[in-house]
Image (cartoon, rainbow, N blue to C red):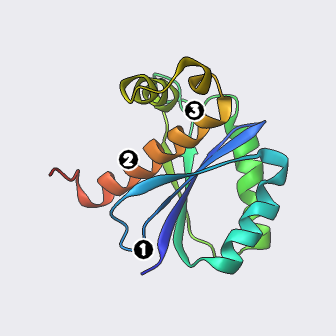
Amino acid sequence: MPKLLAFDIGTKRTGIAETDPMQIIAEGVGYVETPMLLKWLDEYLNKENIEALVIGEPKRMHGEHSQVEGFIQEMIQKILKRHPNLKIERQDERFTSSLAQKAMIDGGMKKMKRREKGMVDQISAVIILQAYMDKQTGPSFL
Protein backbone atom coordinates (compact mmCIF):
# COMPACT_ATOMS: atom_id res chain seq x y z
CA MET A 1 0.00 0.00 0.00
CA PRO A 2 1.42 3.44 -0.84
CA LYS A 3 2.31 5.93 1.87
CA LEU A 4 1.02 9.44 2.52
CA LEU A 5 3.57 12.24 2.65
CA ALA A 6 3.02 15.61 4.34
CA PHE A 7 4.71 18.99 4.11
CA ASP A 8 4.52 21.97 6.43
CA ILE A 9 5.85 24.48 3.90
CA GLY A 10 7.46 27.66 5.13
CA THR A 11 9.46 30.26 3.28
CA LYS A 12 12.70 29.05 4.92
CA ARG A 13 12.13 25.41 5.92
CA THR A 14 9.66 22.65 5.20
CA GLY A 15 8.79 20.04 7.80
CA ILE A 16 8.21 16.55 6.43
CA ALA A 17 6.22 13.57 7.71
CA GLU A 18 5.13 10.26 6.22
CA THR A 19 2.93 7.33 7.10
CA ASP A 20 3.88 3.73 7.33
CA PRO A 21 2.79 1.65 4.29
CA MET A 22 -0.46 0.68 6.07
CA GLN A 23 -1.22 4.38 6.66
CA ILE A 24 -1.72 3.88 10.39
CA ILE A 25 1.03 5.99 11.93
CA ALA A 26 2.33 9.43 10.98
CA GLU A 27 6.00 9.96 11.77
CA GLY A 28 8.48 12.73 11.18
CA VAL A 29 10.99 12.38 8.38
CA GLY A 30 12.83 15.61 9.11
CA TYR A 31 12.95 18.94 7.40
CA VAL A 32 14.60 20.50 4.39
CA GLU A 33 15.46 24.05 3.48
CA THR A 34 12.54 25.08 1.25
CA PRO A 35 14.72 26.03 -1.76
CA MET A 36 15.85 22.36 -1.79
CA LEU A 37 12.33 20.93 -1.44
CA LEU A 38 11.74 20.06 -5.11
CA LYS A 39 15.05 18.20 -5.35
CA TRP A 40 14.27 16.35 -2.11
CA LEU A 41 10.80 15.40 -3.39
CA ASP A 42 12.23 14.14 -6.72
CA GLU A 43 14.62 11.84 -4.85
CA TYR A 44 11.93 10.66 -2.43
CA LEU A 45 9.49 9.81 -5.22
CA ASN A 46 12.19 7.78 -6.98
CA LYS A 47 12.40 5.53 -3.90
CA GLU A 48 8.89 5.58 -2.42
CA ASN A 49 5.35 5.07 -3.68
CA ILE A 50 2.93 7.64 -2.29
CA GLU A 51 -0.83 7.86 -2.58
CA ALA A 52 -1.02 11.59 -1.89
CA LEU A 53 0.95 14.58 -0.72
CA VAL A 54 -0.78 16.45 2.11
CA ILE A 55 0.22 20.09 2.37
CA GLY A 56 -0.65 22.29 5.31
CA GLU A 57 -3.09 25.10 4.61
CA PRO A 58 -2.31 28.08 6.85
CA LYS A 59 -5.42 29.93 7.95
CA ARG A 60 -6.12 32.64 10.46
CA MET A 61 -8.61 32.30 13.29
CA HIS A 62 -11.58 33.34 11.16
CA GLY A 63 -10.72 31.03 8.27
CA GLU A 64 -9.05 33.42 5.84
CA HIS A 65 -5.66 32.38 4.47
CA SER A 66 -2.49 33.74 6.00
CA GLN A 67 0.12 35.64 3.99
CA VAL A 68 2.28 32.58 3.31
CA GLU A 69 -0.53 30.88 1.32
CA GLY A 70 0.52 32.65 -1.89
CA PHE A 71 4.03 31.24 -1.51
CA ILE A 72 2.62 27.76 -0.83
CA GLN A 73 0.43 27.97 -3.94
CA GLU A 74 3.53 28.78 -6.02
CA MET A 75 5.30 25.74 -4.53
CA ILE A 76 2.30 23.53 -5.31
CA GLN A 77 2.39 24.67 -8.94
CA LYS A 78 6.12 23.89 -9.14
CA ILE A 79 5.51 20.44 -7.64
CA LEU A 80 2.68 19.70 -10.08
CA LYS A 81 4.76 20.88 -13.03
CA ARG A 82 7.39 18.26 -12.14
CA HIS A 83 4.93 15.59 -10.96
CA PRO A 84 1.62 16.18 -12.80
CA ASN A 85 0.04 12.92 -11.62
CA LEU A 86 0.76 13.54 -7.94
CA LYS A 87 -2.41 13.86 -5.88
CA ILE A 88 -2.19 16.87 -3.57
CA GLU A 89 -4.51 17.32 -0.60
CA ARG A 90 -4.69 20.31 1.74
CA GLN A 91 -5.13 20.20 5.52
CA ASP A 92 -5.87 23.12 7.82
CA GLU A 93 -2.76 23.76 9.87
CA ARG A 94 -4.07 26.25 12.40
CA PHE A 95 -2.35 25.84 15.78
CA THR A 96 0.11 23.17 14.56
CA SER A 97 3.16 25.15 15.71
CA SER A 98 1.62 25.60 19.17
CA LEU A 99 0.67 21.93 19.31
CA ALA A 100 4.19 20.97 18.20
CA GLN A 101 5.72 23.07 20.98
CA LYS A 102 3.37 21.50 23.52
CA ALA A 103 4.17 17.99 22.25
CA MET A 104 7.89 18.62 22.64
CA ILE A 105 7.44 19.91 26.20
CA ASP A 106 5.08 17.07 27.15
CA GLY A 107 7.51 14.59 25.64
CA GLY A 108 10.30 15.88 27.88
CA MET A 109 12.41 17.33 25.09
CA LYS A 110 15.24 19.49 26.39
CA LYS A 111 14.93 23.25 25.94
CA MET A 112 17.90 23.48 23.54
CA LYS A 113 16.39 20.83 21.26
CA ARG A 114 13.00 22.61 21.33
CA ARG A 115 14.69 25.75 20.01
CA GLU A 116 15.57 24.00 16.76
CA LYS A 117 13.13 25.53 14.28
CA GLY A 118 13.33 22.48 12.03
CA MET A 119 12.11 20.25 14.86
CA VAL A 120 8.95 22.36 15.21
CA ASP A 121 8.42 22.18 11.43
CA GLN A 122 8.82 18.40 11.42
CA ILE A 123 6.41 17.87 14.31
CA SER A 124 3.95 20.28 12.68
CA ALA A 125 4.06 18.13 9.54
CA VAL A 126 3.27 15.06 11.67
CA ILE A 127 0.29 16.86 13.22
CA ILE A 128 -0.94 17.94 9.76
CA LEU A 129 -0.67 14.38 8.47
CA GLN A 130 -2.35 12.84 11.51
CA ALA A 131 -5.21 15.37 11.28
CA TYR A 132 -5.65 14.50 7.61
CA MET A 133 -5.75 10.76 8.36
CA ASP A 134 -8.21 11.31 11.22
CA LYS A 135 -10.46 13.31 8.88
CA GLN A 136 -10.44 10.43 6.39
CA THR A 137 -11.17 7.61 8.81
CA GLY A 138 -12.21 9.24 12.05
CA PRO A 139 -9.85 9.45 15.02
CA SER A 140 -8.36 6.21 16.18
CA PHE A 141 -8.34 5.35 19.86
CA LEU A 142 -6.46 2.50 21.49
Task: Identify the residue shown where x is 68% and y is 70%.
Answer: 44
Choose mark 2 or mark 3, whichever is in front.
3
Q: Is residue 86 left or right of residue 78?
A: left
Q: Residue type at mark 2?
A: Ala
Residue 27 place in picture, x, y as percent = 46, 53
Q: Quadrant of residue 41?
A: bottom right
Which secondary structure lies at badge 1? loop
Q: Mark on residue 120?
A: 3
Task: Identify the residue shown where x is 62% and y is 73%.
Answer: 86
From the image, tell me which residue sits under label 1.
21
| Depicted 132 relative to depicted 20: above or below | above
Task: Identify the residue shown where x is 36% and y is 73%.
Answer: 22
From the image, tell me which residue sits under label 2.
131
Do callouts 2 and 3 mark residues in contact (Cβ within 8 Å)? no
Task: Identify the residue shown where x is 68% and y is 44%.
Answer: 14
Q: Quadrant of residue 43?
A: bottom right
Which secondary structure lies at badge 3? helix
Query: Alpha carbon of mark 2 to alpha carbon of mark 1: how far?
Result: 17 Å
- Mark 2 or mark 3: which comes first in sequence? 3
Q: Residue type at mark 3?
A: Val
